Image (cartoon, rainbow, N blue to C red):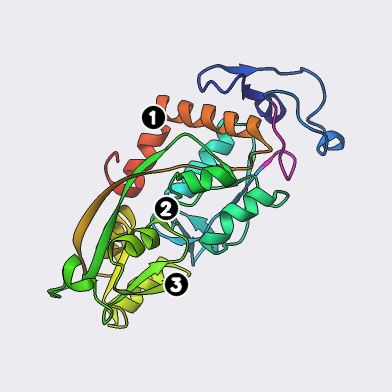
Amino acid sequence: MSMLSRRQFVQGGSVVAAMLLAGCGSSSSGADASSAPADGEYKLVNEGKLTCISNLFFPPFESMNEASGEPEGFDIDVSKELAKHMGLEINWLPSQDFDTLVPTIKQGGKADIAIAGMTITDARKAEVDMSEPYVDSNQSIVVKSGSTETAETLDDASKTIAVQGGTTGADWADENLPNATKKRLSTIIDAMSGCQSGLYDAVVCDLPVSSYQIKESYTDLQIIEEIPTGEQYGIAISKDNPGLTAAVNAALAEMEEDGTMAAIEMEWFGSEI
Ligand code: GLN
């Protein structure tokens, strides 16, 4: 059964023209894994599996469930459903730093997709293919509750702004708070904890993450500014694997249609986002 669905793919990049080419040739056998895929087919680093990488410290999009030792979150559910819609098993690799995800996908051979609350940007699109957008996002400035800081007062060398290295939040802080001292950390959790303990004056990070984190864990923090950057998250895939991008886009379109995406949004945000 999974072999039949494995052959479900999109011709010509259209997200709706998914075609089921069951039984059409035998190139899905492991023996052919290294040969270049024909038009519309795709390569997988592990046969029959969708192998995923992320930075697993970005709740509610991705984090490690301490009890089960398994990754969980919005993107984790999206990846599970993607795999299901593509007739594949899911295979999660250990967490890695956010700024290594695009280079890893570009280099190839380790993972098929990076799904990491990753904003679609021109710079990333120059390195890898990005899927169609699946989440809208903005930036936010976070400070300690009761703080009187504003974007203006924070733009000063005496103020330390914590960001996650290699993110659009880091870029926004560089451009818009040029005078402030920036502290680049490997996770947004480190940034939030440091802000809560008074180590940093503010954090700049994606709004869906800061709002969720403040509600769930960092109740001593508050958002002082929502910044409408109009970002959209996409899934990163190697430019050498256009058939996989097409198949992922087809699966995402199906998930929008069949209510899967809405159900995942309800599960993690309590509403459609
Ligand atoms: N959306 C932001 C970016 O793409 C942050 C992503 C993340 O930290 N996982 O840069």
In what quadrant does ligand 1 lie?
Answer: bottom left
Q: How many marks?
A: 3
Q: Residues within 10 Å of mark 3 (few under 14, many from 20)?
A: some
Asked if 83 appears above or below 102 in the picture, the reply is above
Real-space Cα distance between discs 3 and 2? 18 Å
Type of the residue with mark 3: Leu
Quarter of the rendering occupied by the N terminus:
top right
The tag on residue 259 is 1
Q: Which residues are magenta?
A: 41-49
**Residue 194 screen position, x and y as percent:** 34, 78
Residue 144 visible? The answer is: no
Amino acid type at image mark 1? Gly
Q: Confirm if mark 2 falls within 8 A of ligand 1.
A: yes
Residue 18 occupies quadrant: top right
| Quadrant assignment, res 103 | bottom right
Closer to the chain start, of discs 3 and 2, is: 2
Q: Quadrant of residue 202?
A: bottom left
> CA separation, marks 3 and 1?
36 Å
Q: Nearer the viewer, mark 2 or mark 1?
A: 2
Characterize the local packing of mark 2: few (<14), some (14-19) or many (20 or more) Cα atoms within 10 angstroms. Answer: many
> Could you tell me which residue is drawn at 26 percent across and 58 percent down?
140
Q: Is residue 239 left or right of residue 29?
A: left
Residue name at image x 64 percent, y 39 percent? 239
- Disc 2 marks which residue? 61
Q: Position of residue 211 (x, y in %)?
A: 26, 58
3 or 2: mark nearer the eye: 3
For marks 3 and 1 on the same chain, the one whose residue lies earlier in the sequence: 3
Q: Is residue 216 above or below residue 231?
A: below
Amino acid type of disc 2?
Answer: Phe
Q: Secondary structure at mark 1?
A: loop
Q: Which residue is mark 3?
A: 185
